Image (tube, rainbow, N blue to C red):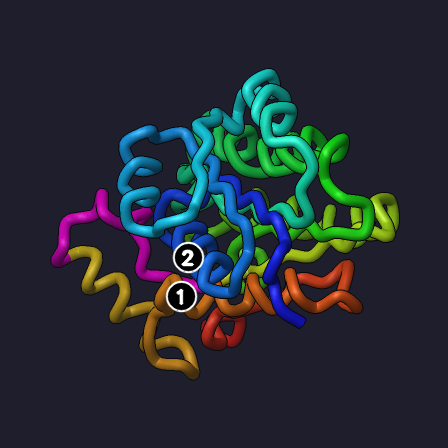
Amino acid sequence: MDLAGQRIVVVGGSSGIGRAAATLFVEQGADVVVAARSAEKLADLAAAVPGLATEQVDATDRRSLDAMFARLGPFDHLVVCFSSGGGSGPFASLDLDALHRAFTGKTLSHLATVQASLPTLRRGGSVTLVTAASAQSALPGTVGLASVNGALEAAVRPLATELAPTRVNAVSPGLVETPLWDGMPPSARAGFFTDVAGRTPAGRVARPDEIAVTLAMLVMSTFVTGHVVVADGGLHLAR
């Protein structure tokens, strides 16, 4: 299988995993549209990857999503990979308002994106979500993250049956070195990466392009649906 001639919409693709996936799809000959909130990041991506189209969208706003998909028209594959952040920390002191915002910003917004795409997504195409390995692991301080991503992963199988023959899958990545972590002081980030990496069989954090390969595999695997593929370097084995 290859992606030549396939039209792929990547929502949340202006940085990190989404950017790496969009770049890989273009290299594989796909017609790629990246949709994201930041006009600055979209402009930077468009300059870096010739032939790639961009759309500005707020995935927390259903009207914005509906308008974007109406502008784009028919396409073959949807990849949803944005994250809202928030929801981490010890459960006893977890900010439940922040957790509510995390559910709205990721779980509900991913589902809204999929729903808004249905009128123009090709029947028999695919939907691939990006969750997080917090849904698979049992590390202290991740109850909120596990809830947000676990709820999204739980939706994959019923979505696959309800939307068939369109395929629905998800990739559940472990710790990936992306701009999501840029808000941490460099020394604290380095220490955090070293600590988490040391708990895993892989012994390191992932690069965005490694997760992009897993996404491409699911987009191209026409006999795979209803699965969550864990790409976490063994983080689910950590204690």
Q: x%, y% of residue 137?
A: 53, 64
Which part of the image, by quadrant, shows the N terminus?
bottom right
Q: Residue 23 carries which label?
A: 2
Residue named by callout 1: 209
The residue at 32%/47% (across/down) is 180
Q: Is residue 144 visible?
A: no
Residue at the extreme bottom of the image, as rendered? 201
Question: Mark 2 is on which residue type?
Answer: Thr
Q: Give the range drawn in magenta.
A: 174-187
Question: Mark 1 is on which residue type?
Answer: Asp
Q: x%, y% of residue 12?
A: 46, 41
User: For residue 162: magenta?
Assistant: no
Crowdedness near tag 2: few (<14), some (14–19) or many (≥20) residues, C-alpha within 10 Å? many
Does the residue at mark 1 contact the one at mark 2 (Cβ under 8 Å)? Answer: yes
Residue at the extreme top of the image, as rendered? 63
Q: In this view, does 204 lie above or below 171?
A: below
Helix, strand or loop at mark 2: helix
